[in-house]
DNA sequence: GCTGTTGTTTAGATGCGTCTAAATCAAAAG
DNA sequence: CTTTTGATTTAGACGCATCTAAACAACAGC
């Protein structure tokens, strides 16, 4: 049996692996999970013994197929839970993450199945992140470009908001920026800030750190439909 | 912060304390939680340090007020979860216990509140066990007599079924015995078995171990109403 | 091609929850 | 009142997840 901690490490390796390319460094894992590097090293040794990661000393780790499956299982739990909490229990957008982060390790297959049933097998969670299917096929995590890569005048639709901070998410929601929102890039300021205009003509300014967490697709020229909030 | 294990021990002490009277023995705790007696002893020492139990060496432990509050909090979580799983996620009667036993340690106050809201603050869980209120006032756990204390001809209404085994519970549900069911005691056999007759005139025989887990109230003479299943 | 910096791993310690084996207490039986 | 029996506690160990301090590898700069 796998401990909740092991699951956490596997999930983290998966996420870091999706972001960068090549093996995942000890320090990035340690930083993400808020532990010291030696702690991460020793956990990676354990996961290597169980053949959930491959490790090259002083280089980093990569998930094995089996390790990836475990990670996807946890991510499926996480995203299903987030969706359930938001849709069925009235949680706000920003509140779902922490609750899901704890519960994801403790629900049964039965629970997973029933939640997926009630939600009618959703494809994405409230942040717009794709939910792995029951068969746990790899999911492509990095579709689209981030908002901060765009230039003035670009017309885009928010796809995903990859942020965990619940205050920041609450702010975005308050200002009408959620998956599905249509935006026009108004200004890209040289001080590390992007200003966007919404369908209701209000503008919102976002520091690069936030804009970089917002993934968007280019909007089709016509600005009809699909700007639901 | 209290670990999930500590919460489990406190819940167990509470439940054993409700059953018997006087201090709770080390061995009864160990047996309930399926650990060895030394393990239970050492945990009781830790809980004593935290002033959650009072301990008299070689005698046993009693919950302090604070310990009881923690236990009631966990029991509230457990029974709310059981109710939620049954009512909102379509779990069968017998399936809810194990799931709730894991989740009870990992839900937030927020989650508890929202679940209670959705369920409209229920008084009892699917087994008929009372759910502690949000203010965690002690709850009287042992109302009514057990079915096995009754004699032939007694007319009773099932109040609570204090059993954890999911197969046994499924059997009872199949045969129409759930909280609220009205029964007539048909026969009390000297081999440790009780036979009861249901509203639909079917009879069911139950060994004493099961009958002793079924708590009942005497039915009012008229056999109308209240026999809903 | 050495050297110094940066990041990684080893070594050794801690607290938790658990175990087995041995010692000790308490209460029942003689 | 002593002895026996059964439960309880002490002693000592282990695996997990974590830490700090120290040793070590890799690579970039000179």
Image: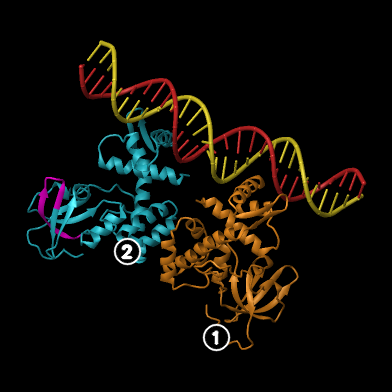
Chain colours: A cyan, B orange, C yellow, D red
The reply to whether the magenta stretch includes residue A62 is: no
On the image, the x and y values in percent for residue A90 come to 34, 66
- Residue B89 in sight: no
- Residue A165 in sight: yes
User: Residue A38 bears which disc, if any?
Assistant: none
Q: Quadrant of residue A54?
A: top left
Q: Quadrant of the C terminus of chain A?
A: bottom left
Residue displayed at 27% across by 56% down: A169
Q: In which quarter of the image is residue B145?
A: bottom right
Residue displayed at 72% across by 53% down: B59
Judged left or right of residue A82, residue B113 is right
User: Residue A120 bears which disc, if any?
Assistant: 2
User: Residue B225 bears which disc, if any?
Assistant: 1
Q: Is B11 placed above or below B182 here?
A: above
User: Dot 2: within a 10 Å radius of its alpha carbon, few (fewer than 14), some, or many (20 or more) residues?
Assistant: few
Judged left or right of residue B127, residue A139 is left
Judged left or right of residue B70, residue D17 is left
Q: Which residue is at the front of the view, B48 or A145?
A: B48
> Magenta region's main secondary structure?
strand
Which stretch did the figure color magenta? A180-194
The reply to whether the magenta stretch includes residue A182 is: yes
Instruction: Say which chain tag 1 marks.
Output: B
Instruction: Say which chain tag 2 marks.
Output: A
On the image, the x and y values in percent for residue A21 come to 25, 37
On the image, the x and y values in percent for residue B24 come to 68, 57
Q: Which residue is at the front of the view, B171 or B141?
A: B141
Residues beneath discs 2 and 1 located on the same chain: no
On the image, the x and y values in percent for residue B199 come to 58, 82
Q: What is the spatial separation of the Cα atoms under label 2 and label 1, in whole angstroms?
A: 38 Å
């Amino acid at each position: 049996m796998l401990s909740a901690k092991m699951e956490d490490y596997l999930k983290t390796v998966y996420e870091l692996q999706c972001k960068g390319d090549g093996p995942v460094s000890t320090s990035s894992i340690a930083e993400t999970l808020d532990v010291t590097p030696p702690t991460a090293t020793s956990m990676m040794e354990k996961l290597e013994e169980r053949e959930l990661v491959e490790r090259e000393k002083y280089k980093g780790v990569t998930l094995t197929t089996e390790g990836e499956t475990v990670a996807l299982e946890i991510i499926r739990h996480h995203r299903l839970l987030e969706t359930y909490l938001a849709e069925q229990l009235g949680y706000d957008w920003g509140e779902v993450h922490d609750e899901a982060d704890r519960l994801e390790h403790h629900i049964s297959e039965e629970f997973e199945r029933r939640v997926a049933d009630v939600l009618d097998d959703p494809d994405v969670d409230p942040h717009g992140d794709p939910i792995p299917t029951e068969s746990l096929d790899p999911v492509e995590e990095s579709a689209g470009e981030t908002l901060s890569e765009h230039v003035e005048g670009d017309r885009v639709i928010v796809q995903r908001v990859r942020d965990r901070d619940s205050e920041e998410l609450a702010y975005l929601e308050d200002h009408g920026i959620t998956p599905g929102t249509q935006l026009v890039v108004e200004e890209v300021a040289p001080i590390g800030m992007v200003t966007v205009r919404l369908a209701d003509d209000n503008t919102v300014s976002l520091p690069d750190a936030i804009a970089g967490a917002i993934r968007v697709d280019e909007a089709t020229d016509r600005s009809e439909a699909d700007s639901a909030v």
